[in-house]
Amino acid sequence: MGKTYKIAVMGGDGTGPEVAAEGVKVLKAAADKFNFSLELTDFDYGGERYIRTGEVLPDNAVEELTKHDAIFLGAIGHPDVKPGILEKGILLNLRFALDQYINLRPVILYPNVDTPIKNKGPEDIDFVVVRENTEGLYVGAGGVLKKGTPDEVAVQESINTRKGVERCIRFAFEYARKRNKRKQVTLCGKTNVLTFAFDLWERAFYEVAKEYPDIKTDYAHVDATCMWMVKNPEWFDVIVTDNMFGDIITDLGAMIQGGMGIAAGGNINPEGVSMFEPIGGSAPKYTGKNIINPLAAIGAAQMMLDHLGESEAALAIENAIRWVVAEKLDSLSAGKMGFGTREVGDMIAAAV
Ligand code: IPM
Ligand code: MN
């Protein structure tokens, strides 16, 4: 018998538990096939629990989660909870507390999935965004003065540390090497305006690049990056960027790869506990209807196994997704799959 992995499963809110269940179904199929075992523990963190207890996360949450090899997350966000409370209190809090300094978001167009980009196909849309995940505008630095008066002042600062920027950039170069495709890393920044923050990023980028003579370097401002992602997505291999820009460009990335229903991501601490999630939200209005697309959650499960070192099992899941999408589903457009959430999960589990 192979290894045993302890996985914390946080279904979360809305359709989160439904898609997480399909991810777990596929994980179990992979475990059977590839001879490893899973010890799954459910955590009820999310909107319901907050409404019931008034607590976003219990005091021991981080301690409990760190006893696991990885965290598998459905979605966070509840219609009856003021926006920001759960997102900051759970999702961002865990990213920070567990020092998941990388947010890895592949942008891959699978065959038979519709992209809104005319004349581009799977051979053109295949890159990864390495988003810094613990710094920048997300740290909550700044403050307000004279709130609610005509003289109100609001300051929100972007914090960029040499250590934080450098470890993120180094991860991107390592990833480009491991990916072994175009072997290119593009720094996405705004060096023409954000002359403090992206000066640091730019210097760190070219210094780290010297350690990777086999990897090409490239730079694009964030606005131009958006333009090229639509016009020439085939130019990209690995894009590295800060937290805010990474948030924005990965929603664009999700759209060009067929929508939120298929976009997966990993919040990674290479030395600690990482958390994998479908990047779309909790889609409250589709809850319980067996219509939400589980592919993003299944893709997140695949990323988790890859991260844990079960690369053969991860590849089998990827191939199963590709095969089911190409051969079984109606063309994945406008969120219609032609099958229910559970049926898609069943087909992928069977294909694994
Ligand atoms: C994401 C989300 C989060 C973010 C929100 C929900 C706080 O948009 O994972 O991209 O901004 O990082
Ligand atoms: Mn986002």
Image: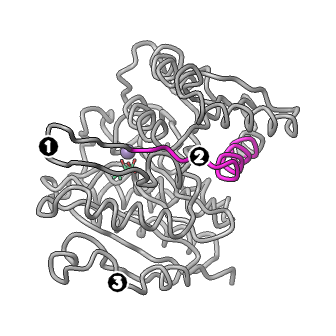
Q: Magenta segment: does it hold 167?
A: yes
Question: Label 3, on which residue?
Answer: 58
* Badge nearest the viewer, 3 or 2: 2
**Hey, what amino acid is under mark 3?**
Pro
Which residue is located at x 20 percent, y 58 percent? 290
Three-letter code for the amino acid on which mark 1 is drawn: Thr
Asked if disc 3 and disc 1 are in contact, CB closer than 8 Å, the reply is no
Of residues 164 and 61, the one drawn nearer to the viewer in this rendering: 164
User: Pointer 1: what residue?
Assistant: 149
Tell me which secondary structure the magenta stretch mostly adopts. helix
**Which region of the structure is painted magenta?**
156-174
Which callout, 3 or 1, points at the residue further toward the start of the chain? 3
Left-right relation of 49 to 210: left
Tell me where residue 298 sits by quadrant: bottom left
Residue type pointed to by label 2: Asn
Question: What whole-number distance in Å separates the C-alpha atoms at marks 3 and 1?
Answer: 36 Å
* Viewer-side residue, 324 vs 82: 82
Q: Which residue lies under the disc numbered 2?
A: 160
Question: Tag 2's secondary structure?
Answer: loop
- Dot 3 or dot 2, earlier in sequence: 3
Between label 2 and label 1, give the one nearer the viewer.
Answer: 1
Q: Quadrant of the N terminus?
A: bottom right
x and y, in percent, of residue 164 in the image: 65, 52
Image quadrant in which you'd find residue 247: top left
Q: Is residue 59 above or below residue 264?
A: below
Q: Position of residue 246 (x, y in %)?
A: 49, 39
Crowding near the residue tagged with mark 2, few <14, some 14–19, many ≥20 C-alpha atoms within 10 Å? many
Q: Position of residue 31 (x, y in %)?
A: 56, 73
